[in-house]
Image (cartoon, rainbow, N blue to C red):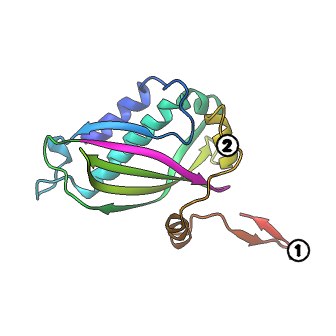
């Protein structure tokens, strides 16, 4: 519940934008493990990591002044898929950092990496595939979102790491060519 409240707070009171931050620049969120983050084994519950990642992605958008830009268009992000790899447990009251960065995008989704560190120790790494929707439920092309969020955003996505692309295909979120009715291909 702690992180749900934190996310609500970040939604209505986002942190100030970072001058000069670009879409491909990393965003850093510092946190401390709270009692509500723990499971019965007294380390951070695996589901709580996902909530912490939500907060860090909200901070990433705030760093880009994304809330005002997205709200003007009535667009919002949703998670299409996520995966985690855990290396070390986080314990009560420990300080840690989540570094969020965009790895790239395709016409459908943006691929983000979120790395949890405690000092110089890697604790966990998450990948998220997210898409953006309009209030009417229409999918927004990622090129439009990237252009909106970054005044100097690149026109094309960086090449995705092979393992991220393989994951995106395995969980069926990657852009794919769909056969059109007349035998030509259409993008889907």
Asked if marks 1 and 2 touch (Cβ < 8 Å), the reply is no
- At horizontal 30% and vertical 56% (from top left) the residue drawn is 124
**Dot 2: few (<14), some (14–19), or many (≥20) neighbours within 10 Å?**
some
Identify the image quadrant of residue 8: top left
Q: How crowded is mark 1: few (under 14 residues within 10 Å), some or many (20 or more)?
A: few
The answer to if 103 sits in the magenta stretch is yes
Residue found at x 34% / y 44%: 98
Q: Is residue 27 left or right of residue 104?
A: left
Residue 26 is labelled as: none
Q: Quadrant of the C terminus?
A: bottom right
* Front residue of this view, candidates 153 and 135: 153
Furthest-front residue in view? 120
Q: What element carries label 2?
A: loop
Can residue 134 be seen here? The reply is yes
Residue 165 % position (x, y):
55, 66
Quarter placement of the N terminus: top left
Question: For the magenta stretch, what is the residue range?
Answer: 96-108
Which residue corresponds to mark 1? 182
Q: In which quarter of the image is residue 75?
A: top right
For the stretch drawn in magenta, the main secondary structure is strand
Q: Where is residue 78 in the image (x, y as percent from the top left)?
A: 51, 49
Q: To which quarter of the image does residue 6 belong? A: top left
Instruction: Please name the residue that numbered disc 2 is placed on.
Output: 154
Q: Which of 30 and 42 is in front in this view?
A: 30
Position in image of residue 185 (x %, y %)? 81, 70
**Residue farthest toward the bottom in the current orientation of the protein:** 183
Asked whether residue 140 appears in the rendered view, the answer is no
- Residue 165 vertical placement versus 114 (above, below): below
Residue 119 appears left or right of 9? left
């Amino acid at each position: 519940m702690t992180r749900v409240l934190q996310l609500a707070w970040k939604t209505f009171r986002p942190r100030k934008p970072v001058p000069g931050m670009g879409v491909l620049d990393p965003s850093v969120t510092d946190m401390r493990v709270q009692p509500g983050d723990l499971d019965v084994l007294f380390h951070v519950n695996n589901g709580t990591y996902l909530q912490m990642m939500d907060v860090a992605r909200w901070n990433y958008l705030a760093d880009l002044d994304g809330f005002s830009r997205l709200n003007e268009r009535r667009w919002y992000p949703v998670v299409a898929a996520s995966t985690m790899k855990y290396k070390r447990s986080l314990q009560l009251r420990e300080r840690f950092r989540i570094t969020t960065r965009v790895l790239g995008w395709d016409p459908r989704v943006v691929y983000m990496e979120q790395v949890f560190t405690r000092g110089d120790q890697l604790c966990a790494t998450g990948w998220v595939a997210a898409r953006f929707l309009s209030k009417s439920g229409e999918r927004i092309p990622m090129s439009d979102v990237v252009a909106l969020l970054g005044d100097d955003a690149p026109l094309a996505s960086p090449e995705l790491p092979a393992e991220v692309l393989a994951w995106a295909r395995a969980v069926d979120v990657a852009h794919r060519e769909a056969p059109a009715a007349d035998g030509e291909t259409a993008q889907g």
